[in-house]
Image: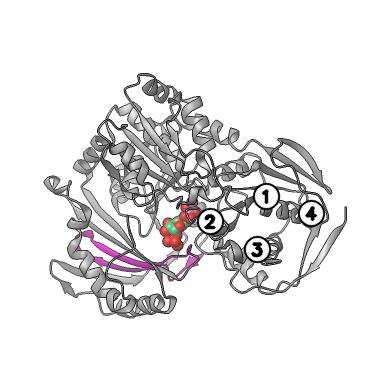
Amino acid sequence: MTIRTVETKPFEGQKPGTSGLRKKVVVFQQPNYLENFVQSIFESLEGFRGQTLVLGGDGRFYNRHAVQVILRMAAANGFGRVLVGRGGILSTPAASCVIRKYGAFGGIVLSASHNPGGPQEDFGIKYNIGNGGPAPEKVTEAIHARSRAIEFYTTLEADDVDLDRQGTVQVGDMTVEVIDPVADYAELMETLFDFDAIAEMFATGEFRMCYDAMHAVTGPYAVEILERRLGAPGGTVINGVPLEDFGGHHPDPNLAHAKKLVEIVNAADGPDFGAASDGDGDRNMIIGHRFYVTPSDSLAVIAANAALAPGYKDGLAGIARSMPTSQAADRVARDLGIPCFETPTGWKFFGTLLDAGKATVCGEESFGTGSDHVREKDGLWAVLMWLNIIARRRDSVAEIVRAHWRRYGRNIYSRHDYEGLETDAAEGLMDHLRKATGSLPGQRFGYYEVEKSDDFSYTDPVDGSTSSGQGVRVLFNHGSRIVYRLSGTGTEGATLRVYIERFEPDETRHDMDPQQALADLIDIARELAEIGPRTGRDAPTVIT
Ligand code: VG1
Ligand code: CO
């Protein structure tokens, strides 16, 4: 088979964001666009000749095509072996698991996560390093730099690989193994959780759950683990068949996009527990019967109860949360006498802490939770952790969370997203806030007084690397906060995220609706950032 060197020209904007490069499918379909980025990845790496690459994605439109392109390029660039999920499928946490288990050099995950899929929608690609986690910023910056100077890429003249047949084939000098995308991951889950206790709970028939795979990648994983291995009744998993366009929906597990699940669980005779996952399987939403658990609370509850799961029985070394995530986890860490790390948004910042054994459990307010079992957030892991906690405590979701609030107090929390803003207006708003940080401390807004305000910057305590410009924080007295940042995962215009938090120690007020409980802070947030005048929006697009 002949290796071909193809002349090409750089594309603008091949800059990985919070989690890889995400663009409209039509952008990726431009001749050489995908190839340029893949070649830029390979040229930013050293020492992969003869090594193993893991490859798979969330099954969205363009996934299969991209897999074939990458296989040919990996062979031409000198990889020795590629492990690819059957059908081109690997959830993000499963890819992380496979990279680690087989000591791969790294992996390429094809996904735009919770963004919609289909010919008119989004596609994405990200590179993960040998620890199984997202490439750190120095790697993504190198990839971007390469993409701006690229002149050639190399590929092989070879036929497509049959992705639906498990087994080993040769592509040039490279071996391609088409693997079961679920088996390694399911096996890992069995080592972490008390499958017997969970299975027993399902067997009684008194405990029922509904899992919404949102026609995204976790369908096969959830059917295998929940229905087959844990014995939950058939039909526990809904929307379990991955579709290239996710059935036309946003595969985003929140109250806005997982409406059907919420309806099922909240029905008069609805199940006790509901959960959903996103496009690539790394996010999770947890709900009880008529009770919604915010991701920040979920992280705190998981941290406080993790020792009930066999894989965590010796306790946690530490907790890590992204900066905008609520401070509920910090209270648990204080109580356990372990550190709580505050990192910029994006799972890539947890990798060094997990590798160094400084943190065991990590989480983000954006429906992301995970642990040191892999180096990505992990939707099904969170669901199994909750099932393990419920099986051992024999309490409802609502009872578990309310008891948590009684013990630690409640960090009332909400995120307001303003989507599809004009980029200039959004950037102007952030500039305005950054300038205001200097003069805000000491200013009073009714009950609230600003104690500190800055644009968050982070120094990694393990490798000393720094990241600045990670979001404007306005920190008030009594632990209340407003945080502003622009999304790094969108593909259209700009998205402003506003994170609002207030601590409520008074148990009689724990059941308040967050929008009401935070109403005065929400007004302050709009006023400080001049959201109305600058964006023309009088309300957020999505509230979580
Ligand atoms: C969002 C979330 C962030 C998450 C990222 C990737 O990023 O806020 O917490 O890590 O998505 O998640 P941004 O920059 O749009 O706020 V996923 O499930 O897309 O891999
Ligand atoms: Co995701």
Is ligand 1 closer than 8 angstroms to the Cβ of mark 2?
Answer: yes
Alpha-carbon span between mark 2 and mark 1: 23 Å
| Vertical position of residue 462 compared to residue 275: above or below | below
**Residue 147 lies in the magenta stretch:** no
The residue wearing badge 4 is: 78
User: Split into 4 quadrants, where in the image is the C terminus?
Assistant: bottom left
* Three-letter amino acid code at the position of disc 1: Phe
Give the class, few, some or many, for how many residues have Cα within 10 Å of label 2's Cα (few <14, many ≥20): many
* Three-letter amino acid code at the position of disc 4: Gly
Q: Nearer the viewer, mark 3 or mark 4?
A: 3
Q: Nearer the viewer, mark 4 or mark 2?
A: 2
* Three-letter amino acid code at the position of disc 3: Gln
Q: Quadrant of residue 475?
A: bottom left
Who comes first in sequence, dot 3 or dot 1? 3
The residue wearing badge 2 is: 112
Residue beneath the point at 59% across and 64% down: 140
Alpha-carbon span between mark 4 and mark 2: 27 Å
Alpha-carbon span between mark 3 and mark 2: 15 Å
Give the class, few, some or many, for how many residues have Cα within 10 Å of label 3's Cα (few <14, many ≥20): some
Q: Nearer the viewer, mark 1 or mark 4?
A: 4
Who comes first in sequence, dot 3 or dot 2? 3
The residue wearing badge 1 is: 105
Q: Quadrant of residue 458?
A: bottom left
- Locate residue 45, reporting x and y percent: 69, 60
* Three-letter amino acid code at the position of disc 2: Ala
Q: Quadrant of residue 326?
A: bottom left
The residue wearing badge 3 is: 29
Magenta stretch bounds: 465-490
